[in-house]
């Protein structure tokens, strides 16, 4: 009975994470801070949030089993920082619904990369799924999408997706990170992005609303969402959780259209259906989403 309740709570944690991730483009549209500055604020707040939750949950002290390794810094810290920065950059350059759909083709790339890393040729299902997804997006590219979306926005969205692939491959190899490891990962990524912001951008002070929106990204879509997703991976069914991630671009696009941030366009709905359907066909089950190993067990009440 306890196992069943944990499974249900794991599924609910996954649904909660997906809903929070879907609100990310809406929150980005509420702040005028430049991309690197938003990313630095969000990741810094996420580090504080995850550290506080770790202490409240009486988890063990943040371990450092992965810190210092090349893959930790390149794919873990760099992948997380790059995914956030390029996504924010793309959202500021083009139609946010189109950008979100482009970015969330990354599960297809993740499945393909996971397959190639095994030394096998890509399965027909992967190629079929990719073809369906990009066929659905092609009309948006040809017509400029529901709103103005220049090539730079598409490239930034694809770069964000590529960073997510690198980060996801790192997490797959590392296993589900314990609560204590998230604070260090967020903090190091925040430090990298802050350094780049000071070197490449002019700090914009804006008003309280700009900073609150950036902080809300760190509290919700990054702080809480990642931690509840980690809980979901430990207690919920991997296949269902992997499927839930494909709902993010659909929910995000629907929210943007409903709020008037993106124009309603039938091509947008077609592209959303194609991305989700193609990703489901390509994944073919929970395999690529299943962690290869887990960190040593930590005492936690979460």
Image (cartoon, rainbow, N blue to C red):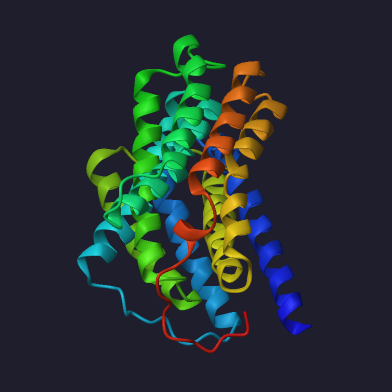
Q: Quadrant of the C terminus?
A: bottom right
Q: Name the residue located 57 percent from the left edge and 30 percent from the top edge.
A: 274
Q: Is residue 75 above or below residue 177?
A: above
Q: In the figure, is residue 35 to the left or right of 229?
A: left
Outermost residue, top direction?
A: 143
Q: Name the residue located 47 percent from the left edge and 18 percent from the top edge.
A: 138
Q: Is residue 14 above or below residue 297?
A: above
Residue 18 in the image, given as x and y percentages of width and height? 62, 51
Q: Is residue 30 visible?
A: no
Q: Name the residue located 34 percent from the left edge and 37 percent from the top edge.
A: 159
Q: Quadrant of the N terminus?
A: bottom right
Q: In the figure, is residue 1 to the left or right of 47?
A: right
Specify the quadrant of the image occupied by residue 93. Answer: top left
Residue 72 in the image, given as x and y percentages of width and height? 28, 65
Q: Name the residue located 53 percent from the left edge and 23 percent from the top edge.
A: 136
Residue closer to the observer: 271 or 28: 271
Residue closer to the observer: 102 or 153: 102
């Amino acid at each position: 009975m306890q196992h069943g309740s944990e499974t249900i709570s794991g599924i609910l944690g996954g649904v909660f994470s997906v809903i929070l991730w879907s609100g990310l483009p809406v929150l980005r549209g509420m702040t005028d801070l430049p991309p690197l500055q938003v990313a630095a604020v969000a990741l810094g707040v996420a580090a504080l949030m995850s550290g506080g939750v770790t202490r409240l949950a009486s988890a063990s002290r943040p371990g450092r089993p992965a810190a210092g390794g090349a893959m930790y810094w390149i794919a873990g810290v760099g992948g997380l920082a790059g995914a956030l920065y390029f996504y924010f950059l793309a959202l500021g350059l083009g139609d946010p619904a189109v950008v979100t759909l482009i970015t969330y083709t990354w599960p297809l790339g993740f499945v393909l990369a996971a397959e190639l890393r095994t030394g096998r040729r890509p399965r027909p299902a992967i190629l079929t799924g990719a073809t369906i997804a990009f066929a659905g997006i092609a009309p948006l590219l040809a017509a400029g999408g529901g709103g103005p979306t220049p090539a730079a926005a598409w490239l930034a969205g694809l770069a964000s997706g590529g960073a997510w692939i690198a980060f996801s491959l790192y997490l797959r190899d590392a296993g589900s990170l314990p609560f204590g490891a998230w604070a260090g990962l967020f903090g190091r990524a925040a430090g990298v992005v802050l350094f780049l912001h000071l070197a490449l951008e002019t700090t914009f002070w804006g008003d309280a609303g700009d900073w609150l929106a950036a902080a809300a990204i760190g509290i919700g879509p990054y702080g809480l969402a990642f931690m509840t997703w980690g809980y979901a991976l430990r207690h919920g069914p991997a296949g269902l959780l992997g499927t839930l991630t494909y709902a993010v671009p659909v929910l995000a696009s629907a929210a943007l259209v409903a709020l008037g941030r993106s124009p309603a366009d039938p091509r947008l709905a077609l592209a959303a259906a194609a991305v989700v359907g193609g990703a489901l066909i390509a994944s073919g089950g929970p395999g690529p989403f299943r962690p290869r190993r887990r960190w040593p067990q930590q005492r936690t009440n979460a």
